[in-house]
Image: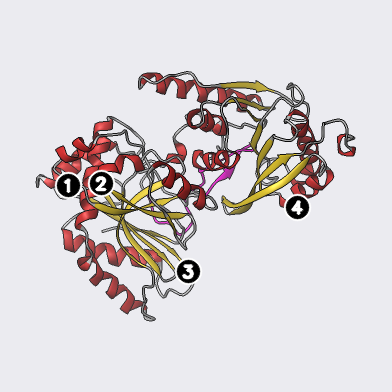
Amino acid sequence: MSYQGDGADQGPETAGASPCSCAESEANGVDAITVTIGATVPTGFEVTAAEEVKEKIGVEATISKDRGRIYFPITTDKLFQVHLLRSVDNLFVVVEEYNHYQFKESKEETLMELQQLASKLPWTNALEVWKLNGSLKKRRGHRKGGNAARGKPDTEARDETGSEMEQQPPPADTTAASEDQMEVEACAQASDGAASGTRPLKFRVTCNRAGDKHSFSSNEAARDFGGAVQEFFQWKADMTKFDIEVLLNIHNEEMVIGIALTEESLHRRNISHFGPTTLRSTLCYGMLRLCKPQPSDIILDPMCGTGAIPLEGAIEFSSSFYIAGDNNDMAVNRTVNNVCHMQKRRAEKGRVSGLPIDTVRWDLCSLPVRTSSVDIIITDMPFGKRMGSRKKNWDLYPSCLREMARVCRPGSGKAILLTQDKKCFSKAMRSIEGLWRRLHTVWVNVGGLHAGVYLLKRTEAAFGQTPEDVYE
């Protein structure tokens, strides 16, 4: 018997779903019920995700004390809308939540209590939603890439082009996660087969625990709670080829039990040609929402890496035009390949395949772009950790900020810049304070690094008429 537990803040992987009508939901014999959906989101962009839920689904979302999660109510006839959210990494349906769970001081007593809890939980609605969710994915058709190795939503690595992706291995204390890819259609068929009694469901329990006042480890909680779940449902434990994943999320005194609704995280949705790292699509969406792109805006990513930001923008904010560039040939090639792959996918689905993106190889500090011609600049700057160095950043940051100011429209232009090198960035900002004004900062966790997403506003000053324009 095996269960998964880890000390990191992990969540289930996310796969999209295509819209279905209320009639389709009723055809499955499931009356509309109200449940609570949990979603993992990029840490720091919880408010952005809550705003998207309100905008697209029309319900209020609650931000969890455990950073990187939000919760919101939804009726099952609108379940497909949840899969269309752009800011969430992973989704699960809540079985039960406790805001102030009183854990016992003794480890043995606590684990015994978790075992007893399994048979007392209101599983019915959550399991109905899980089954309906499988039907949604089955209608969507064949899709590969489920049940990949799980990682904390904000576990990322740096790329040689300055962008990021979630490609780090799991934390050291994580027990073996699934490397076998499971097709969503097969999962849906398995749920149908289990319901008809042809075979028992395969399951695993994943425990995500945060807090230093617990007498037990996440592995111990997953093991004991999972054993009780197995005994209660007569399911078969399987760490890799499971049909259903039960989540035990513990953050200090807050405990949430849920069932995963997704296998493949949304943050991988746009990229087919990865570099060593690629910026997560969900983080790209959060950055784009900060600058509020308008129709006909020209949006520039001067350090595009694999093109994650312009790709997300071209798909979600398609009325703007995007220019992606990098000084690295491999990065430019990856961006071109990713754009072509996305256009092919869209054409296969019968959608308009063209994307408003141009890709260029250039020198960041001498852009082949007209002065005052860009509305928004949005990019992931080198941290000086895995890409470049802090020493190089001292020269690079002032130079690129000056060049960005040249091409950006005075008075109305904006820049959204992601960097962990806060000291260097602050010094560079002081050196060109006549050209840029800092409006807002969102603090995010990027691969364990405390990074900032800075929203800057271009001042009214015309480039070439301030002391900051002179740079040697």
Mark 3 surroundings: few (<14), some (14-19) or many (≥20) residues within 10 A: few
| Label 2: element kind | helix
Q: In the rendered view, would you say 262 is above or below 214?
A: above
Q: Position of residue 88 (x, y in %)?
A: 44, 45
- Depth check, mark 2 against mark 3: the one in front is 2
Q: Residues within 10 Å of mark 4 (few under 14, many from 20)?
A: few
Upstream in sequence: badge 2 or badge 3:
2
Q: Point out the tag, 4 or 1, that comes first from the N-terminus.
A: 1
Whole-percent x, y for residue 412 in the image = 70, 35
Front position in the image: 197 or 298: 298
Tell me which residue sits at (48%, 57%) in the image.
Answer: 172
Q: Residue 211 carries which label?
A: 3
At label 2, counting other C-alpha atoms closer than 10 Å, the crowd grade (few under 14, some 14-19, many 20 or more) is many
The picture quadrant where one finds residue 4 is bottom left
- Residue 279 at x, y percent in the picture: 55, 39
Say whether residue 301 is left or right of residue 390. left
Earlier residue among tags 1 and 3: 1
Q: Is residue 168 magenta?
A: yes
The residue tagged 1 is 31
Query: Pointer 2: what residue?
Result: 76
Considering only order in the chain, which callout, 2 or 1, is on the residue closer to the N terminus? 1
Instruction: State the CA–CA distance, disc 1 to disc 2.
Output: 8 Å
Disc nearest the viewer among 4 and 1: 1
x, y percentage for residue 66?
A: 47, 61
In the image, the segment drawn in magenta is 155-177
Mark closer to the chain start, 2 or 4 = 2
63 with respect to 123 (left or right): right
Q: Do the residues labelled 1 and 2 touch (CB within 8 Å)?
A: yes
Query: Would you name the residue on which mark 4 appears?
Result: 423
Res 67 label: none
The amino acid marked with disc number 4 is Lys
Left or right, 29 with reference to 251: left
